[in-house]
């Protein structure tokens, strides 16, 4: 976690933490109704709200959050909201963020389960979902373009990304293994580069 964010979190007064927890809850609750396409569909919204508008963190910090959340077991979007909430205000904000992002899905699933037969056979619902799925694609692409500069800073980043993409597209190698190998390779190569620069 970046030192600036850790310091900011520790310096918050209890009243400010509570205010921030409510803000995070309502933010994630609001976007939780529109997270079609998985966790990546909210990254653009988080970038706009917390990087560009509120300036609570940088693109690099958000990219680190997303990378760690994607690498951990569990649902990426929950991992991301918990980690982000914790970095913004500790356990209270982490809980508020997780509750906010999970509650809309829970409510929608209750309604859909209750009226499953009506939804499953409704041609208008099926057509609406086609449009929703299509609309998700540019949202995800927008998030990728916003975070590209933070993730791909030099030739090494492009090489890692290209190799990972090729492995994902043309092999059955585990995605978790690709992430693990990428992390280890990054540590080894960048440590070697740092030692070389020090000499």
Image (spheres, rainbow, N blue to C red):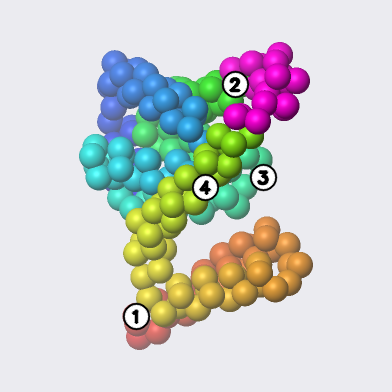
Q: Which residues are magenta?
A: 107-125
**Alpha carbon of mark 4 to alpha carbon of mark 3: how far?**
28 Å
Residue where numbered disc 4 is placed = 134
Residue marked by disc 1: 198
Q: Position of residue 26 (x, y in %)?
A: 39, 22
Q: Verify CB contact (< 8 Å) between mark 1 and mark 3.
A: no
Answer few, some or many: residues within 10 Å of disc 4's Cα (few below 14, many 20 plus, some between 14 and 19): few
The residue located at (59%, 70%) in the rendering is: 164
Q: What's the distance in space between the residues labelled 2 and 3, CA to CA?
A: 24 Å
Distance in Å between CA atoms under marks 1 and 3: 37 Å
Q: Quadrant of residue 23?
A: top left
Q: CA distance from mark 2 to mark 4?
A: 20 Å
The residue under label 3 is: 73
Main SS class of the magenta portion in the image: helix
Q: How many marks?
A: 4
- Residue at the image point whose x is 48% and y is 33% from the top: 34
Q: In this figure, which residue is indicated by the disc labeled 2?
A: 108
Tell me the crowding category of disc 1: few under 14, some 14 to 19, or many 20 or more residues within 10 angstroms, Cα based.
Answer: few
What is the residue that sits farthest to the front in this orientation?
123
Task: Nearest to the eye among marks 2 and 3: give it.
Answer: 2
């Amino acid at each position: 976690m970046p030192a600036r964010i850790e310091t900011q979190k520790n310096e918050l007064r209890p009243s400010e933490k509570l205010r921030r927890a409510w803000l995070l809850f309502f933010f994630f609750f609001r976007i939780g109704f529109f997270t079609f396409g998985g966790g990546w569909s909210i990254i653009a919204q988080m970038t706009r709200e917390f990087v560009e508008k509120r300036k609570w963190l940088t693109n690099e910090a958000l990219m680190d959050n997303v990378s760690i959340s994607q690498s951990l077991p569990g649902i990426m979007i929950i991992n991301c909201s918990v980690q982000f909430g914790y970095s913004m205000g500790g356990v209270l904000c982490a809980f508020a963020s997780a509750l906010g992002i999970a509650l809309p899905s829970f409510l929608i699933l209750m309604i859909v389960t209750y009226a499953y037969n009506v939804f499953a056979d409704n041609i208008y619902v099926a057509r609406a979902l086609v449009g929703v799925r299509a609309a998700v694609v540019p949202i995800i692409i927008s998030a990728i373009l916003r975070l590209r500069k933070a993730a791909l800073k030099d030739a090494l980043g492009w090489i890692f990304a290209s190799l990972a993409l090729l492995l994902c597209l043309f092999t059955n190698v585990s995605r978790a293994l690709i992430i693990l190998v990428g992390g280890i390779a990054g540590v080894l190569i960048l440590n070697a580069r740092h030692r070389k620069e020090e000499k």
